[in-house]
Image: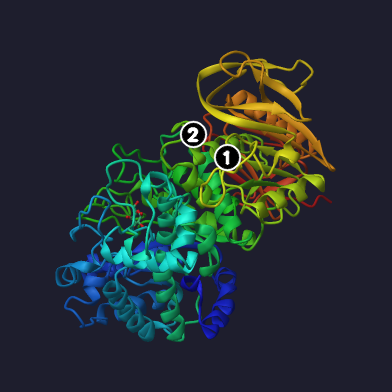
């Protein structure tokens, strides 16, 4: 894609910067800090800020994210004097800066003078200023203005000694369905398909008389009388992600061209639906992510662990940066729960356990005005005489103690397949059930690993599964030939594969593959299907008594089932009644040196755990302390255990003390406490254990 191309010299300097985050952490230790918005405060507050930052051990702050209207109050003018002063002050105090291009939130004058810079939603409504993010990534005028201010910023500060990283825009995710977007979408489609006939074929426009005579007739998805063409929607999502990446890339290249050699990045948002982060991953020098799990959600510790494994995987295993999180409550949910300082610490150490070399927050000082006035911050409105700030000081001290962890890798032998276009295609409307949600399924499968202290990498379809001895495909609606081949190669070579329902159904355009399903995996799975049906909750399954891993309870399925036929696979469970009574629901099949399971329905948590632990045990996978996985979990409830390099992280998210038998005599890096055979982790507490050499 031209959108991701970089000039050769920019690429070369980016390669140099690629190691820049490692160099930064080698210098600073684990990064610690947050978004710093001094433009919201009078000058005298800044001295107080840096004094308290130093006290807390803050070593990195992100400056300028929303400062466009402060830098360019009047079109074409620049006021950098305040920023000069801020950067100098931070530098004098030994605090490094992640300098942001302020392009996420244009000043009101841009939309007033150039309404075409404002995005238009599906209903044709043009959005206004007065909030933030009111720009269209398709707008040439927005892009020119954003580039102009980026160039000036980069030229002024590329060599400023405080600037150690660049932050382009913020949480790229804007959509636009307007006329300028229509033009850009058509250009994208021309590059993709070359001819209108190819587009008609790919979109299946013979249905409902949608045939296009030329690219000029094609529109973004807009409000229409009935269901929109699903491939039109799918391609619009691809285009939208690419268009955002193009905007990011333009600003990144402008920073490089100004001579900046620091790493350049932007903040991802986990499983965010409007950007395909597999395609973005190479465009950033360090993977950075914003994470706001709901403290009231019992599944949050496992679900955020999955996001953290995704971030590590996007960077090919390299350390990543937790760019934003909340030290306590957010202010944008309907009902916002605070965290204890201990929970804020636990959440941060969890990210370190899963490969983060930096822990940052939104934001340093709590806003006194505006929509985020009730959002927690490292320095609350109450000031430094507060439990929150004391917690921040403690966290700073903890992170300093964890310096030996910097750069260490998490090794995982289990891979989980996930990609954005398949997620997008699977959730287009008009399908057997709207209750099957890709992310929900990935989370359910991952929780079994989490409860067992089994680390996982997220795999991009088509990637060589490499050293992964177990590959999980919770729900991949689209499986392309290259991805099917990679799965087949992995299983031939001895890997265990578990494939979930409604996988391998469609091609890259979301068109149903012809023949019995999953067309490209039938030989591998030894089972095939011909139809899908929504399933009532709690539909009974009959389990083969010879299947020794079968659970005693929870022999049910819901949401979706398939009319399956075993073509050589062993049937582990069959439907007990209903339209598919007696037909296979869960199968297992030997293939090459490995084995493949197919779960042809959304089975209960108990059954899912049984199948997954069956596959893990079959592959000889044990948890981080050498114990084989169990369906109910092989760790005490609520305890998370991850090995990062030589360090064993134990994080107790539960309500009770958790005792674990250790593989060796160990010492806690956080407290220097020593343990011989076992450690008990108090509720809400964490340990970072390293093997202790006994004499
Ligand atoms: C993020 C955003 C921050 C701040 C934060 C609040 O989405 O990047 O600027 O608004 O949410 O939780």
10 Å crowding of disc 2: few (<14), some (14-19), many (20+): many
Going 39% across and 50% down the picture, which residue do you hit?
A: 326
Going 41% across and 76% down the picture, which residue do you hit?
A: 250
Mark 1 touches mark 2? (CB < 8 Å): yes
10 Å crowding of disc 1: few (<14), some (14-19), many (20+): many
Would you identify the image quadrant in which residue 208 lies? top left
Would you identify the image quadrant in which residue 150 lies? bottom left
Q: How many marks?
A: 2
From what the image shows, is residue 435 above or below residue 151? above
Which callout, 1 or 2, points at the residue further toward the start of the chain?
2
Determine whether the residue tagged by mark 2 lies in a helix, strand or loop.
Answer: loop
**Observer-nearest of 483 and 29:** 483
Residue 24 % position (x, y): 55, 72
Q: How is the image coloured?
A: rainbow
502 displayed left or right of 151? right
Numbered mark located on residue 436 in the image: 2
Would you identify the image quadrant in which residue 506 lies? top right
Residue 417 % position (x, y): 62, 47
585 displayed left or right of 427? right
458 displayed left or right of 221? right
Residue 552 % position (x, y): 67, 15
Judging by the rendered image, the residue that carries numbered circle 1 is 475
From what the image shows, is residue 134 above or below residue 608? below
Going 62% across and 23% down the picture, which residue do you hit?
A: 606
**Observer-nearest of 558 and 197:** 197
**Observer-nearest of 299 and 7:** 7
């Amino acid at each position: 894609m031209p959108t991701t191309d970089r000039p050769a010299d920019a690429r070369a300097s980016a390669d140099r910067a690629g190691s820049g985050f490692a160099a930064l952490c080698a210098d600073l230790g684990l990064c610690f800090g947050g978004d710093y918005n001094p433009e919201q405060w009078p000058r005298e507050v800044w001295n107080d800020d840096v004094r308290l930052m130093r006290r807390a051990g803050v070593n990195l702050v992100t400056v300028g994210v929303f400062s466009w209207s402060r830098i360019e109050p009047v079109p074409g003018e620049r006021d950098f004097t305040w920023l000069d002063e801020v950067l100098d002050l931070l530098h004098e105090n030994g605090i490094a800066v992640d300098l942001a291009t302020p392009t996420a939130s244009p000043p009101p004058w841009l939309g007033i003078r150039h309404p075409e810079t404002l995005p238009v939603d599906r209903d044709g409504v043009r959005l206004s200023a007065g909030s933030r993010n009111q720009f269209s990534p398709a707008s040439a005028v927005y892009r020119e203005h954003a580039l102009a201010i980026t160039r000036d910023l980069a030229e002024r500060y590329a060599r400023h000694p405080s600037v150690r990283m660049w932050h382009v825009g913020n949480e790229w995710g804007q959509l636009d369905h307007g006329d300028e977007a229509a033009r850009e979408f058509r250009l994208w489609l021309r590059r993709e398909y070359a001819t209108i006939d190819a587009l008609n074929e790919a979109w299946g426009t013979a249905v409902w008389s949608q045939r296009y005579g030329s690219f000029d007739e094609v529109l973004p998805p807009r409000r229409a009388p009935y269901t929109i063409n699903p491939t039109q929607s799918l391609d619009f999502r691809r285009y939208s992600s690419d268009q955002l990446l193009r905007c990011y890339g333009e600003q990144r290249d402008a920073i490089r061209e100004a001579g900046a050699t620091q790493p350049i990045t932007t903040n991802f948002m986990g499983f965010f639906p409007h950007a395909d982060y597999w395609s973005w991953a190479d465009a950033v020098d360090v993977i950075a992510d914003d994470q706001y799990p709901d403290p009231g959600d019992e599944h949050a510790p496992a679900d955020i662990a999955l996001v953290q494994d995704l971030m590590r995987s996007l960077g090919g295993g390299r350390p990543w940066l937790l760019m934003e999180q909340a030290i306590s409550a957010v202010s944008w949910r309907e009902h916002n729960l605070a965290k204890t300082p201990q929970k804020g610490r636990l959440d941060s150490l969890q990210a370190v356990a899963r490969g983060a070399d930096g822990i940052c927050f939104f934001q340093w000082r709590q806003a006194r005005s505006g929509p985020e006035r009730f959002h927690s911050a490292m320095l609350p409105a109450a000031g430094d005489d507060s439990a929150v700030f004391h917690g921040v000081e403690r966290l700073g001290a903890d992170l300093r103690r964890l310096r030996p962890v910097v750069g260490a890798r998490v090794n995982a032998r289990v891979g989980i397949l996930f990609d954005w276009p398949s997620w997008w295609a699977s959730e287009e409307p008009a399908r057997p059930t709207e209750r099957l949600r890709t992310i929900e399924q990935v989370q359910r499968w991952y929780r079994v690993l989490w409860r067992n202290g089994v680390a996982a990498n997220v795999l991009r379809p088509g990637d060589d599964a490499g050293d992964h001895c177990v590959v999980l495909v919770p729900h991949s609606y689209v499986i392309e030939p290259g991805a099917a081949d990679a799965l087949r190669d992995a299983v031939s070579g001895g890997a265990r594969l578990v494939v979930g329902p409604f996988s391998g159904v469609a091609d890259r355009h979301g068109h149903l593959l012809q023949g019995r399903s999953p067309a490209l995996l039938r030989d591998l799975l030894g089972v095939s299907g011909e139809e899908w049906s929504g399933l009532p909750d709690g539909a009974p399954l009959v389990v083969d008594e010879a299947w020794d891993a079968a659970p005693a309870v929870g022999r049910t399925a819901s949401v979706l089932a398939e009319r399956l036929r075993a073509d050589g696979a062993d049937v582990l469970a069959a439907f007990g009644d209903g339209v598919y009574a007696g037909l296979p629901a869960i199968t297992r099949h030997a293939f090459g040196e490995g084995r493949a399971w197919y779960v042809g329905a959304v089975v209960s948590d108990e059954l899912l755990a049984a199948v997954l632990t069956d596959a893990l045990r079959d592959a000889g996978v044990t948890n981080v302390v050498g114990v084989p996985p169990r369906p109910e979990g092989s760790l005490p409830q609520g305890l998370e255990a991850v090995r990062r390099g030589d360090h064993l992280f134990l994080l107790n998210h539960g309500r009770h003390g958790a005792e674990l038998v250790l593989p060796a005599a160990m010492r806690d890096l956080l407290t220097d406490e020593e343990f011989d055979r076992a450690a008990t982790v108090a509720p809400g507490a964490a340990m970072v254990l390293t093997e202790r050499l006994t004499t």
